[in-house]
Each structure stands twice: as structure tokens, then as C-alpha cells.
Amino acid sequence: MDPAILHIHEEERRFPPPQAFKAKARIKSIAEYNSLYEESIRHPEQFWAKQAELLRWFKGWDSVFDWDREACRFTWFKAGKLNVSDNCLDRHLEAHPEKVAIIWQGEPEQEVRMLTYRQLHQEVCKFANVLKKKGFRKGDRVCVYLPMIPEAAIAMLACTRIGAIHSVVFAGFSSAALKDRIQDSQAEILVTADGSRRSGKDINLKEMADIAIKDCPSIKNVIVVQHVKNSAAMRKGRDSFWHEEMCGISDICEPEHMDAEDPLFILYTSGTTGKPKGALHTTGGYLVYVHLTFRDIFDYKDSDIFWCTADVGWITGHSYIVYGPLSNGATVLMFEGVPTYPDNDRFWHVIEKFKVTVFYTAPTAIRALMRFGDAPVKKHNLSSLRLLGTVGEPINPEAWMWYYSTIGNSKCPIVDTWWQTETGGILISPLPGAMTLKPGSVSRPFFGIRPVVYNEEGNLAKRDEGGYLAITHPWPGLMRTVWGNHERYIETYWEKYKGEYFTEDAARIDKDGDIWLMGRIDDVIKVSGHRIGTAEVESALVSHPSVAEAGVVGRPHQIKGQCLYAFVTLKHGIQGTDQLKQELIQHVSTTMGPIAKPDYIQFADGLPKTRSGKIMRRILKAIAEGAADVGNTTTLADPTVVDELLKHRIE
Ligand code: PRX
């Protein structure tokens, strides 16, 4: 067994739901959860059909679930017709048109926008008409490369209104990453902004977009939101401003009747190979799944102010800023800034300002803020909070305890939610009114989810034995394919355990049935909760003219969780100077984006390789982590490279 999946730590602390929380919770006891869970497993079709009725359908489905196991294809709610924007907007117009749908807090304190359901509906219909005017129709791809501004949600919902498929690219990615994603999806329109803001600085997004689309002939139109109001260069005939397009256009746009299995969006994510894969999510199943998980895991109340700090460019933003909350008619807060600007109490300030009730963030942010102690928190009244959540990576018990006691004042349960871009919504998490929490455990599977852990031999792991996490049966929110590459979908997710979804995570299930995540088992590293494929960083490094070869691995980091450690072999005759290191770091940042910058670069004359030439990352990882023993090196073509690497290891 890989040492990474051996478990050593025993967590003894227990936190039952506070009485006051439990009394008002949707699901109030473990018995209630157990009975609903059992029903969802015993009669999945009946269960999901009932949940699907929470949404508005233009036409009912013919069959709830069909599964061609051989082809790894399945459908939910086949032939049912609905529209996502209709469910997220129109459906709420009768009940509460003036309820605020989106509160937007800009990075500058004075910049706040409130969009009611009525206003959001109008904006979405108008932008849908803009897309239509440009000739966009059902099935066409729209690339959205926007900062955290309401226009991102408006553009996404407008796509769903007309049945176009959106592909949102995180605005922290740079040109090359954007280019790859546009080329793969063959998007014909790019929605972007003149710039984005980051810690008081403006970043010229349009310039990056322009570099990317030089090599993207599929792009016919670029629509630019004037956000930072720089003088973005506009190309005649191709580029236009959002506000000009929206001027005078009708705000009436009938929602397209979409098939439940029609594609809704593509979202690119990193994997083991250098090429990101486009996870394809479809309309009906995805919406049912995010609707229900949002409602039950965040114990949704009409009066909630829900703040998810993720970027809309990641799956968390898609599912729990846009589709989950809005399909429930909730008020969501969208925040453009960062936790530490202009000061390290910005999060707490925003919670107090808008009386946020449910706060959902990442362990890396909690760790970063914990460093400043309790004083910045105590400056603010956080008594509006009733529930906390985390996502993206394992949370260490110290950070959990600080979050619980200092932020939640020991009265807010924490939902530690485990899921993935591929899974559409949360799969494993406590239900906050029903479950006793253990710091560091993600608790129990959500309704309809059947997790199993396999040991190295492929048998079911015993209680507390670490192993590989798989899910035995498809659920409505699971991605349907990799865009344009069903083979890759099969290979990555369905081949290891025939007919079961393989998560590429390690986990264990304890004696009470609670699940503990133990990290990725592939070459994907979570840096500050962002998913980074080491192969992508390696190819970015190798694209620099001085680099011959690179091996990138993760190293534990106090705040980021993991950071990147790169071993780089230079081309013959090139000197490994500090200046070159900085240049390489900058090169990765400009090709991939600042999130992928290595923290360490070690120059090396040779990398540990097998006789067939494969880089042995296991050994590089041991070196980067400072392990006392790097393990077996006898299969290496040249074992002496290891001594050299150890000698020059960066502390
Ligand atoms: O390793 C798991 C980790 O994040 C991976 C998925 O990353 P991504 O697709 O970017 O989606 C992140 C947001 C849903 C998983 O394979 N992960 C996510 N949540 C947790 C987690 N690891 C431990 N605990 C979590 N709560």
C-alpha cells in the first residue's frame, strides 16, 4: 500500500449539532438521514423522480434512469424538457420578484450591486437576445472569461436560456490556458472584460484574451464588459462592448425547451496528462442534483444570505454560487476581492456588512487567515452566521477547530464537503442538523451516493483501512463524458473498477461509517485548493527555450496545503542561475497562470528515470518532501542521480 494512504492520526473530538440548530434543521436526526438514505439506495429511481419534481418541467420524462454499462453511457430523466434559467429565475418571479438574488461586493468597498430576481431575469433575457442576434443557437459554445462580477452569472444563465453550452475559464488563467480551452471546445464567442482587480491592482484581461484568440480561428465575436474602465483595444467587426450590446435590446426571451440530457456546460479540469479535460455536464440531472444538495447540505432557509467564496470559474462557483442557490430562490453574495486586501479582516468585514448566514470557503483561506490570530475576527460581529462550510482539499483539525470556535463561535456546524468538478455537486458531507462532526472527516454520503473503498488488492477495504475511493452507481449530477473524447472518459473513470466511477482519491471509512479523505492518488496536486496537473506545469517549463526536461511534484505547505517543487534539467551549456529560476517561474505564470507557479526550482543534471525513460515521480516526491528514505532505486537507469538530487535539495 502506498504510504500516503496509511492512516496514523486518530481524531477523538466530537461535535453534535447544537440544539438550536437541530430544532430548525431540514433533516433533524441521524435516524431521519438513515431512512432517507436507505430509500435513495433501495429505490433510486423513485427517489430521484420525487426530487426532480422540485423543479419545473415543460414535459415529463419517459424514464428516470437508463444505463449502458458497456458504453459507459447513462441518462437521467430521458426525454424530459426543462430550462435551467427558467428554474433559476422565472419560477421565482411570481413568489418573490423583489427578493435580492445577487449581492455583489466589489474589491473596492464602495462598489456594491444588488440584483433582484426581477432585475437578474431582465439582464439574462437581454443577454440571451444579444447572443441570439449574433446567431447563437442551441448547442453552440460560448467561452466566458470574466472576473467575479455579476455579468459572469448573467452570461452563464443567458447561455442556458437559449441552450448554448458555456465553457467558463477561470480569469486567473493566462492566455495559453485560455487558448487551449477555446481550441478544444471550438467556442465561437468569447465574453470577457477589459480587466479584473486583484489586491488593488488591475489586470488587463482583454490583452490576455487577445493573445489567446490569435490562435483561435473559431472565435467570431468578443463581447467586453467595461469593468475597470481601461482603454482596452477593440478590434472592429469582432469586438463590442457589453453595455452597448445590451442597450435597447428586448428583455423578453422565451426559454428554450431543453432535453434533460442536452449539454449544459463544459468545465475544464486537470488530470494526469498534460491536456485538461472538458467535463461535460447535462441539463436535467445536474440541476436536480445541485438543487437538492444545496437545499439539504446548506440547510437552506429563505432568509439566508449565502456566501460561497469560490471563483465562478471553478465548479464550486458554478454549482453553489449560480445554479444551486438560484434554483432554490436564494440570495447569494458574490465577492470580487481576496481575503487579505485591503486588510486581513476583509472576509469578516463582509460577513458583518451583509449579515451573511452561511459561509462556504476553502481550507487554504482558513489557514491563511488563522495566521493573523483572533484579533481581526473579534473586530467584527459575526453573530449572523449559523452554518459554515469548506471544500477543495482536506482540512487539518487545527484549522477546523479555529474555524469552528473563532469564526462560528462554537455554535455553527461545519459541513466539510467532498466532491469534484466531475461529480457536479457535493457527494460526501455532513448534514448539519443530523450528524455529529469529527474534525477532518467528511462524514456520510449524500442521498443516492454509494461510496466504496478498495484496498491495493482490489478487495473492499476493512474499516479504517485506507484505499481507493469509488462510487458504484451513477447519480444525476455525474459528468456524462469528456468533451470530444469519450474514450478518455472511460479510461480515466470507468476502467479501474469496471462499471464503477473511480474518483482518483484515497479514503478510509471508520468504524462508525464516517469517511476520511486522504488526498489524490494521481499526479494532480491541490495548491491552495486549486487543482493542478503536474504534467501541465512540466510542459509549461519545457516550453521555455532553456529547459530540456522537468519533473514537478508536490511538497506540503503550511498555508497552501501543497505547493509545487520543480526539478529542472537545462539544455546543454545553459547555467542554472537564480535569475533563470525567476524567469522560469514567470514563464509558468504567463503560460498557465499565477496559481501554477512553482515555489521551488531545483536544477538537476539528471532526473531519476526507469530504463524505459519514465520519470519516477515517487522518488522526486520523496526528495522534495525531505523523506529520510527515498525508497527502492534499483529499477533506475542511473541510481547515482538520486544522490546528486539529495545533495542539492532545497530546504
Ligand atoms: O482530492 C479531492 C479534493 O479536490 C479534488 C477535486 O478537485 P476539483 O475538481 O478542483 O473540485 C474542487 C471543488 C469541488 C478531489 O478529488 N477535495 C475536494 N473537496 C475535498 C477534497 N479533499 C478533501 N476534503 C474535501 N472536502
Image (cartoon, helix red, strand yellow):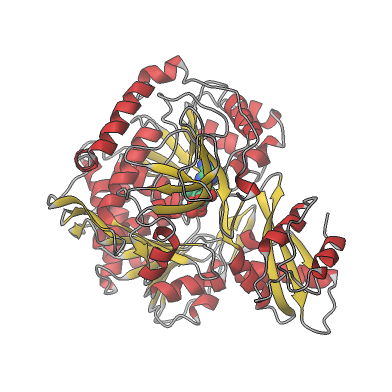
| Residue depicted at 41% across the width and 30% down the height | 431
Residue 72 horizontal side relative to residue 513, left or right: left
Pick whichever, 120 or 283, lies toward us. Answer: 283
Q: Is residue 98 shown above or below 285?
A: above
Left or right of 496? Residue 648 is: right
Choose between 291 and 642: the one closer to the eye. Answer: 642
Residue for point 74% across, 74% down:
637
Residue 363 lies, in percent from the top left, at 59, 41
The percent coordinates of residue 193 (x first, y second) are 48, 64
Q: Residue furthest top?
A: 19
Q: Nearer the viewer, residue 22 or 345?
A: 22
Seen in the picture, residue 49 relative to 135 is either above or below; the reply is above
Q: Quadrant of residue 277?
A: bottom left
Between residue 642 and residue 301, name the one nearer to us: 642
The mark tally for this picture is 0
Q: Residue 382: give x, y in percent of width and height.
A: 55, 27
Q: In the displayed structure, does residue 60 sit left or right of residue 414?
A: left
Q: Residue at x 31, y 61 (%)?
A: 72
Vertical order, 479 against 387 (above or below)? below
Residue at screen point 30% across, 39% down: 328
State whether residue 32 appears in this view: yes
Would residue 379 be visible to someone looking at this image? no
x and y, in percent, of residue 545 in the image: 71, 82
Quadrant, the C terminus = bottom right
